[in-house]
Amino acid sequence: MWRGLPEFGETRSEVRRRWRFFVICGKIVYICPTETKQNLKMILNEKLPKYLLGKYQLIGTVTFSVLFAVVFLNIYIPFSDTAWFGLGDSIMFLYTVVFIAVSICILICSRLIMYRSKSIFEMTYLSYIIWCFMEILVICGFYTWLTTDITLPQKGTEWAVFAKALRNGSIALGIPYLISGMYFAIIDKNNTIRLLNYENVVTDEPVKPDAQKHKITLFDNSGALKLSLNPDNLYYIESDDNYIKVWYTDSKGDLKQYILRCRLKTVEEDFKGSPLVRCHRKYIVNLSKVAMLRKESEGYVLDLDNEAIPPISVTKTYTDSVLSHFTEQSPLLEPMED
């Protein structure tokens, strides 16, 4: 959000009138008209939030868009001279089923490619809007071909039919895209506020003033915030196929675990440079909770400061990264001055 400074002699109400209101992919922003181009360009080039690219969010967007489009077309058909959808005539009903089925396949394939490609390139608001518009163009192009060549064959009407299809398609799909984006943005914001309002989601410790600055937050594969906790409570994270087990202590000191669907590699990348260091193919350890690092015949072993946790071995692949953390630490005992 960008705020403009009041001009000389300008009241607050006059300042507000200078602002414009935009909704972009569910994100609500205020932009000053005098800086519209620059600010809008900055927003469009921002990275798209994870909550719009999650698997369940993409499925929800496609499902809602299809249902909204079907309802919209049923309302629009009686007022259109180019709409041929029908349920009575067997041929038109067949064409209707084919169009709906192909349109759904286009949306599913498009969103599947979007989901798979998020790890290849970084999608921005602008690229997401272009992607959605291309989906509408492809579906409208298919409708135009089906109308002018099969159902209502008329030469020279292609562009007129396509223009109407593009207008209606933008409404039938654009509105549910926007509503879905706003819905997922609200859900994500509420989850974030709910979790960050507590010192520790998984304990009943009282909130401390500076606790919010040192949270460890964990997201699942869909980008939803699932866990937020104090680093002092976290001991280690264990990989279990497509899930991870987060081992922590509650306010009573009892060892607990929290399971969420996430890759250990993702956690490792998100917390680079922190005390959360990978020491094994299956483990990420909070090195600030290590009571002892010892060398055994088969390699190094970490003993955490909780007797309920068994020793965790350090494999050769991760030995250097683990040892570097300890060698970079300041000595516990400073030499005494005379």
Image: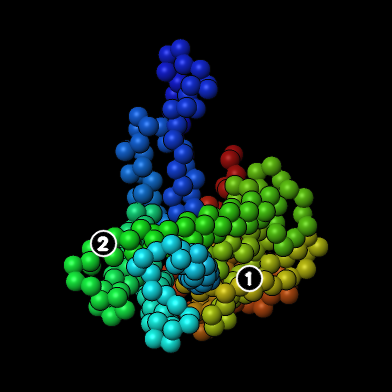
Residue in the picture at 52% in, 57% down = 179
| Comes first in the chain, label 2 or label 1 | 2
Q: Residues within 10 Å of mark 1 (few under 14, many from 20)?
A: some
Q: Nearer the viewer, residue 319 or 247?
A: 247
Amino acid on which disc 2 is placed: Ala
The quarter of the picture where the C terminus appears is top right
Q: Position of residue 18 (x, y in %)?
A: 43, 27
Q: Judge depth for marks 2 and 1 and give the one in front.
A: 2
Residue in the picture at 57% in, 81% down = 240
Q: Position of residue 226 (x, y in %)?
A: 62, 64
Residue beneath disc 2:
160
Amino acid on which disc 1 is placed: Val
Note whether 115 is above or below 193 in the view shown: below
Q: Nearer the viewer, residue 307 or 163?
A: 163
One can see residue 334 in this view: yes
Residue in the picture at 63% in, 77% down = 311
Residue 246 bears which disc, if any?
A: 1
Residue in the picture at 48% in, 21% down = 14
Q: Residue furthest left?
A: 156
Q: Residue furthest right?
A: 252
- Badge 2 marks a residue whose secondary structure is helix
Q: CA distance from mark 2 to mark 1?
A: 59 Å
Q: Residues within 10 Å of mark 2 (few under 14, many from 20)?
A: few
Residue 18 bears which disc, if any?
A: none
Left or right relative to 231: residue 131: left
Note whether 14 is above or below 24 in the view shown: above
* Residue 105, image quadrant: bottom left
* Residue 183, image quadrant: bottom right
Q: Nearer the viewer, residue 240 or 326?
A: 240
Left or right relative to 17: residue 334: right
Left or right relative to 156: residue 288: right
Q: Position of residue 316 (x, y in %)?
A: 44, 78
